[in-house]
Image (cartoon, rainbow, N blue to C red):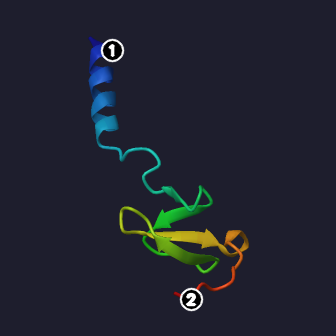
């Protein structure tokens, strides 16, 4: 009976936790992170699918290529 009660309490506690890795969504080929705000050491690259910002560290940002004029 005690084990059943512990199991029910554990399942209820797990049900109230957020899903794993919800804050650490990756972007830009796995080098960036989707966040609401970028930190001072990061640069905004583009929007993630959930409308958050894709933030890259300054050291991992892609090199600027020649501009393409259309």
Q: Residue at x 47, y 75 (%)?
A: 37
Residue 55 spot, x, y in % from top left:
55, 70
Q: Residue at x 71, y 76 (%)?
A: 63
Within the image, what quadrant is residue 40 found in?
bottom right
Residue assigned mark 2? 69
Q: Is residue 44 above or below residue 15?
A: below
Packing grade of label 1 (10 A; few <14, some 14-19, many >=20) is: few
Does 65 sit left or right of 11 as displayed? right
Does 6 sit left or right of 53 as displayed? left
Q: Which quarter shows the N terminus? A: top left
Within the image, what quadrant is residue 39 found in?
bottom right
Q: Nearer the viewer, residue 5 or 53?
A: 53
Q: Of the residues under marks 2 and 1, which one precedes in the sequence?
A: 1
Element marked by disc 1: helix
Q: Nearer the viewer, residue 3 or 48?
A: 48
Does 17 sit left or right of 58 as displayed? left
Please, which residue is most extreme toward the top here? 1
Element marked by disc 2: loop
Q: Residue at x 57, y 62 (%)?
A: 28
Residue 21 visible somewhere in the drawing: yes
Residue 61 spot, x, y in % from top left:
67, 72
Residue assigned mark 1? 3
Residue 38 visible somewhere in the drawing: no
């Amino acid at each position: 009976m005690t084990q059943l009660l512990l199991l029910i309490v554990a399942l209820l506690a797990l049900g109230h936790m957020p899903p794993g890795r919800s804050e650490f969504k990756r972007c830009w080929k796995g080098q960036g992170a989707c966040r609401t705000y970028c930190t001072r050491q990061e640069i905004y690259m583009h929007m993630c699918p959930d409308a958050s910002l894709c933030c890259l560290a300054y050291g991992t940002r892609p090199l600027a290529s020649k501009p393409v004029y259309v």
